[in-house]
Each structure stands twice: as C-alpha cells, then as structure tokens.
Amino acid sequence: MSGKFTKKNKILLGFQLLLAVAIVTASLTILASGTGEVRVNRAQFRNNLTYYAAQFDYELLQVVDHINRYVQDDPIVTSDSLIIRLDIAWSRLSHQTPNLRTDVYLALPGAPEFAEEALEVFSAIEPELVTLNRGDEARANAITSELRRLVTLSHAVAMQAIAYDAENDAIHLDLISVRNRSVMYLILAFLSLATFSLFKSWREVGSSFRLSAHLERRVEQRTLELKATNRMLRVEMDERGRAQERYRSLVDHATEAILILDGEKGTFVEANPSAEKLYGLSRIALVAGYGIVDLSPEFQPDGQRSDVAAMSYVKKALEGEMLIFEWTHRTNEGVEVPCLVTLNLFPDHTRDLVRASIIDLTEKKSAEASSAKLERQLVQAQKLEAVGQMTGGVAHDFNNLLSVILGNMELLEDLTEGSEKLELIEEAKQASFRGAALTRSMLNFARRADLNPQEISLGEFVGRMETWMSRTIPVTIKVETSFSPDVWSITADVSGVESALLNLVINARDAMPDGGCLRIETENVVIEKRSDDFAKTGLEPGCYVMLAVRDTGEGIPADLMPKIFEPFFSTKGLTTNSGLGLSMVHGFMTQSCGDVLIDSEFGIGTTVKLFFPAQVKGQGRTMIEQEAQSTTHASKARILVAEDQEDVLNIIVRTLEAEGHDVTKATSGDDAARRFFELKPIDLLITDIVMPGDLQGPSLARHLRSFDMDLPVIFLSGYTNDAVLKGNGLKEEDVHLMKPVAREQLLKAVNGALGTKRELSEENRLRRAGRATSVTV
Amino acid sequence: MNKNMLGAGWIALCLSVIASFFASGVIAQESSLSPPESPIVLHVSERLMASAPERSFAFDIAGLERLGTIDLRTETPWSEGAVTFTGVRLRDILNAVRARGSAVVATALNDYSVTIPVEDADTYDVIVAMRKDGRLMSVRDRGPLWLIYPWSDRPELRNEVYYSRSIWQLKSLELLE
C-alpha cells in the first residue's frame, strides 16, 4: 500500500515540477518581452517619425508655394519669409549635431540619399532665392522643379517612415501579444500549479488523515489490549497479593510458633508472632542472633545436653528428615516451657534453612494433670454418688425402722414404771433420736441436689435454733451467741442451713466431752480481692455473711486437716458418728456458693466458719455496690413514714429530717394512704408491716403502687415471718429492715431505695414502652 | 544674415538698452518694455474674454534678455550629450506681460503649434532659450527661440508630452484663459 502511495505522489510531484518549469519559462518570456519592449521603445522615434517625414513634405511644399506666391507678387510673402521657409525646411535636415532622431530618420531606406540630395539642392537654391525677384517666373520654376523632385523623394521616405512605424507597431503588438500570451500561460500555469498543489495537499491531507485514522485505530486497539492485559495483571496481582496475605496470615496467626533456623548456626532467621509470645522476645531480637540453645536450659529433662541434642536434630532435618520431638525451652524470663517441636528442611537456594514448628505444651500438660485429677475426682464423685444412692435407700429404710423402734419405745414408756426402766427406755429413745438425726443428715446428704433457697436472716435463724440446741447440748457446755444486728440476710436452703449448723454444733459438743464454751457468731464480711486470707477458699470477692461455731475443744491435728471434709472420715469413731457431717456441710456450702473454713489448734479449740453469699436485693448489685451507692447522699426527697409506735416513728422522722428529707408522718396504713393522696408525689414509703387499721404494710404498699408503680418501699418489721412478706405483690427490691433499725442502716436503705427508684423508673418506663430490656445483673 | 553681424548687433543693442534703462530709472514690467529695436522674435498676446481687447507684446532678443536669463544645461533628444541653453524663464515672460491665463499656445515658424499649460511655467524652469552653448540660433539651427525644459534635472519630463512641448523656431505665445 505504501508503494502505491509513493507512486501517486511521484506523479503529482512530476506534474508540479512541469508546472513550475512552465511558470519559469513564461516569466522569463515576459521579462524578455518586457526588456525587448523597452529597447523598442527606446528605438522608437520620439517625435513620431511619420509626422516628421510628412512634415518635411509639407515644409518643402511650403517653400515651393512661397516661391510661387513671391513670384506672383503676393505681398504677404517677403524675401525674408521666403528665406525663413527655406531655413525651416533646411533645419529639418540639420545634423550639425548628430542625434538620435535624425539617425533613425536617416536609417530609413532612401533617407540618406534624399537628405544628401536635399542639402545639395538647398545649398544650390539659397543664393538663387536671396536674389530672386518678384515676377521672375522662369527662375522660380527652375527652383521649384528641383524642389518638386525633392518632394517626391521626401514622400517616398515618408512612406518608408510609415512602413517603419507600422512595422514597429507590429513588432510592438507582437511583443504585447506574446507577453499577453505568456501572462495568460503564466496565469494558467499558476492556477494549475495551485490546483495541483491543492489537490496534492488534499490528497496528502486525506492520506494523512487516513493514516492517522488508521494509526488511531491501531492505537485504540493496542490500548484496549493493554487495558485488558492490565486488568488481567491487576487481577492476578490482587490474587497473588491476597494469596500472599493469606499465607502471611497463616504464619502470623498460627497458634504454634513458626520459626526458620539457619541450619549451620542454629540461629533464628524468621519468627512469627506466636514465637515472639513463646520466647518473650520481639521478632527483631530473635532474628538478631538468638538460637535454639540460647532459649533452652543447659540440660533437657531426659538428661541430654541441649546444645548437642539441638545440633543433632537440626542436622537430621537438613538431611531431609522430618522430626517431631519434645523439647524444653527456656523463655527470656527464665520460665521453662515444655514444647512439641517439628523440624523439617526449608527449601532455599542460598543457604541451609530449617523450619521449626513449636507448640507450647504447658497447658496441655497441666490439662493432662487436671484431667487426671478430674478423673480421680470423678471416681471419687462416682463413689460418693454410689454411696449417696445407697445411703439414701438405706437411710429411708432405716428411718422407718427407727420410727418403729421409737414408736414402740414410747408405747413402752407409757406402760412402764420404775425409773431404772424408764431410764433405759429413755436411752433407747435418745439413741433413736440420734439415729433419726443421723438418717436425716444422711437423707440430706443424698438429697443434696435439691436445695430450695430462701431468704434467711441468720440472726433469727440462730435464735430459733437456740431453743432446740438447749435440749441437745449438755449443761457443761456454755453456749454463747453473738450477732450483729444489721447482719445481711442470705439466700440458702433452710434445712441445709439447719443441718449444717446442727452438724457443727454436734461436732463442737463432741469436741468438748469435759465441757467448755460453745460460741456461735454471725458477722458481715466483705471479701475485697483475692486477699491471702481467703486465697484458700474458692470465694469470689463480694459480700458474705459468716456464721462461726467456736469450741474450746480438743482441736484437730494439722495432719488430719486435709481429710477433714472427706466423707466417712471421723475422729470420733464409727459407732458414734457417720463421718458424713463435715463433708455434707462442705458440700452444702459449696453448692450454696459459699465455703467452709476451719481453724483449729490442737488442744485449744476449733472454729468452723461458714460463708454464705449475702443476699443481693434483686437488682444484681452486690452489697458493696449498694453500700457504695448508699454512701452517696441522695438528694432531698419526700418520704412518707407509716408506723404505729410513736417513739419508733419519731426516731425515724428525726433521722430522716436531719438528712434534709421532707418527711410526712402517718400512724396507720389508712392514714398513710390519705396523706399520700394529699401530698403526691411521694419519693419513698417507709412502712411498718403490722399496723392497726385496714391497710397493713404490704397492702399499703400495693395500694399506693397502684398509683405510682415505681414507688420504692422500705418495710420495717419486728417479726421475722417471711411468709408475711413474700407473695404479696411486693417487689424483690423492697428493703426489709429489722426493728430496731440503726440509723446508718436506715439511711443506707433510704439512699439505696431512692437511687433505685431513679433507675427503676427508667427501666420500667422502657419496659412499659414495650422495649425488651435486660435487667442489669 | 551674418551671424557675426548679428552678434555684434546684439551686443550694441544690449548696451544701449541697458543705458536707456539706467537713464530712465524705471525697471517696471509693462512700461519698462521699450519698443524693440532689433527684429521681433516673439509675439506674446493675450486673448481674454471676447469682450476684452486683445493685448499683445512684441519682444526682440534684447527685450527678452532684459527680463533676466538663466543657463540651463540639459540633454535633449535632438542632441548628443548635454547642451547649455541660455534663455528667459517662461514664467518671467508671462509675469512681465501680466498675463493671466491657464494655457499658452506656442506657435512655431512652420505653423506647428502646441498648447502648454501655465503650470509648466510655474512648476519648472522652462525657458525660452535664445542661445545654444552661448551662441544665438539661426532658423536653420532651430532658432531663434526654442522652448527648453530642464530634462536633465527633471526626469519626469523625459517623455513625449514634454518633448512635443519643446517647440523650436518659436514665433508666438498666445495666452488662453
């Protein structure tokens, strides 16, 4: 295609050259004609040769005419004028100074001869004319005939002049026409050249357009190809990048430590984050020159030297073996860590590298240990369960048997007289009672899973137990009880607590065969952190109520202490004791989320402490929090106090008013209700439980709550009957205080209740709004 | 007509004319024009409107020369090389006769005539020459008067128009309005 292209171009170029040549030729011709014309012009006779020649004729004739007229006596013509006439004619031929004009004239054919002739004639007739007289016709004729001859000659020359002029004109015209033609050709040539040039340019432009269009298309095509390739490359790159990322992640996120070792030196070349964690060193540090041997103890547990063993393993790996073995490392902090190491060859062209995967086995080992322990525990538990089941059944049957025995004994008692016999019966009965107690505890032991936690105030509890205890405890033992009045209540299974306390008391009694002192205490305990005192226990930090049973008995020897909670373990001999007591207590306490602690000194005494978790008032906050909250002073509130005992009422009112609260008194439930409606809104209700009138404490609370759902209530009671409180539409969060109420306790309760109200209102509002809110736990 | 005689005659005439000029003490235009003593070479006439009388003046060589001559050296188509013509400026002649007109009809002895616009006289130092290279000109010599343009000095005059106006054997100037 390009070949054809050039050929066409060549043709066009040829044409252009031809035209150029034509133009040049025409121009030269014009120039030539122009210069020719100039020459011709110059050659032209300036004064009109024809006229000049013709004028000569005329002059001659004039002379002739004048001569004739002079001779005929015309007065106008004088001798002078005649001479003048001759002179005029003569002047025409005067070439005293040769000049261009006369030269041209003289160049005419016949002219020089004529001029010579004329001059001769003039010279001849001059004297004649001067001496001519008027009337001398003869002489005049002679003269004129000569002149006439001249005239003819002159005319001939004149004709020549005309011809000459005509010729000049012809030449001139020719030149002009030539020039015109040339100009015409020139113009044509120019036009053609222009046309061709335009055409050529157009073609060139066209072809260049085509070319550029073609190129553009090619470029576009290429660009598209490139773009496609680009996209592909990018996709691939992304893929590669992602793959790399994934592999990177694999290594970085591997839980095992992955390292690359230099096979020769045993130093680390690469380390992943898990390796950093394992050794306690940063990657940069590890790679800086640490080796396996640096991070291992001098000797391995199997006795080998670490350096020797390590090198042999590495060597084997370099030979292509894959090794898995246990190895003890030593971290940067000096902690020995048992590990499982996998070594294999890491391919690299430049040096010998070994890849190591290291898994920390400490947990596994401890897990193994604990699982072994668990197994043992499981076996133990199974044993216990078996025992439990067995005892359950046995106890049940045994209980029945005892009932029979006891029943018969009692019948017998009624029928018997005589103190000795009655004593025997009594002992039998006592034995039965003890048996019953035993079976009961056995049954409790068996029934351990079925706890029914209830809210208990330990103080009351112990109070109740006192009466019972007085029967079982001999007089030789002095019983003391000590409770803090504001001891927190607990939630526990009543019978469980009963039997636990019973067990402890019995143990204490048995520990003092010769008498002593038995002391029962209750106390609030707050476990802040894992303090050392309670590290032995499994107790989480929090609020607890401690029930302690102290005796001044023989105490428990230290070597027996670990076994004290084991079932069937007893120091008292199997006949008198099942050995299940303390283990049962322990089990119960653990189940109740508490614990048992025993302090004992051989020969001094024993204290058994039971830790019950303190009752949290329904909102899931620990007592600490509640305590904390109650210390923050609640803002002034409007409090309604309902209490029939005036002195109690006054104390409460005074206490509250001292805190800045706005207190309204009411002496009965009905009174309180009336006041409520008069005074609304009320922020808090403090009410006695038992009051005169229709509305008792609980019902008052319910009544008022029908108008204000979020009203907090504090109940005061002198009675401990839970049944009165429970299930009367009262809320969990209601505080229940024991009379007499200590000032601090009251205030704490008030603050707590007021704080609660705020929270509760918000919660209830949300609940009522239909949103599911989780009660904060 | 001997040139030498003529020459002597001219000199005598000139001297006498100059003497009479000094004697009269008048160097005016019209009035100073003393009647020609030697043969009249030039008639200058003015033909204004038909109603007005014709004014005419006659000059002899001396009379013309009295008007003030200048030398004009120029090349001519009728000569080879440059020639020095001595003559009176045409405009001086026209001023002397107080001529008012737009054109001058110059007529020669052989009745050849040519119309010269007055602008030529004003613009150029066109002279009515009476001497060629210092010598008076005979009729045969194209004299006695030849209207000469300053061709050498003025190249724009070197064309047929002005060549045709360069009338020799000048005999009269007639002013047209």
Image (cartoon, rainbow, N blue to C red):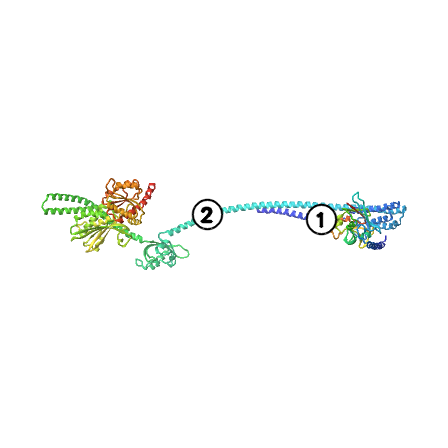
Q: Is residue A702 left or right of residue B126?
A: left
Residue A46 visible within the image: no
Residue type at mark 2 is Met
Of the image marks 1 and 2, the number of the one nearer the N terminus: 1
- Picture disc at residue A198: none
Specify the subunit that label 1 lies on: A
Considering depth in this image, is A13 or A66 the residue closer to the camera? A66
Q: Is residue A16 left or right of residue B129?
A: left
Between marks 1 and 2 in the image, the one whose residue lies nearer the viewer: 1
Q: Position of residue A74 (x, y in %)?
A: 87, 45
Q: Is residue B63 left or right of residue A302?
A: right
SS class, disc 1: helix
Residue A647 visible within the image: yes
- Picture disc at residue A34: 1
Verify CB contact (< 8 Å) between mark 1 and mark 2: no
Labels 1 and 2 positioned on one and the same chain: yes
Q: Position of residue A242 (x, y in %)?
A: 41, 49
Considering depth in this image, is A524 or A198 the residue closer to the camera? A524
Residue type at mark 1 is Gly
Considering depth in this image, is A209 or A533 the residue closer to the camera? A533
Q: CA distance from mark 1 to mark 2?
A: 78 Å
Specify the subunit that label 2 lies on: A
Q: Position of residue A674 (x, y in %)?
A: 28, 40
Q: Position of residue A464 (x, y in %)?
A: 20, 46
Badge 2: residue crowd in 10 Å (few <14, some 14–19, many ≥20): few
SS class, disc 2: helix
State the residue lying farthest toward the left: A418
Q: Which residue is denoted by mark 2 in the rendering?
A: A232
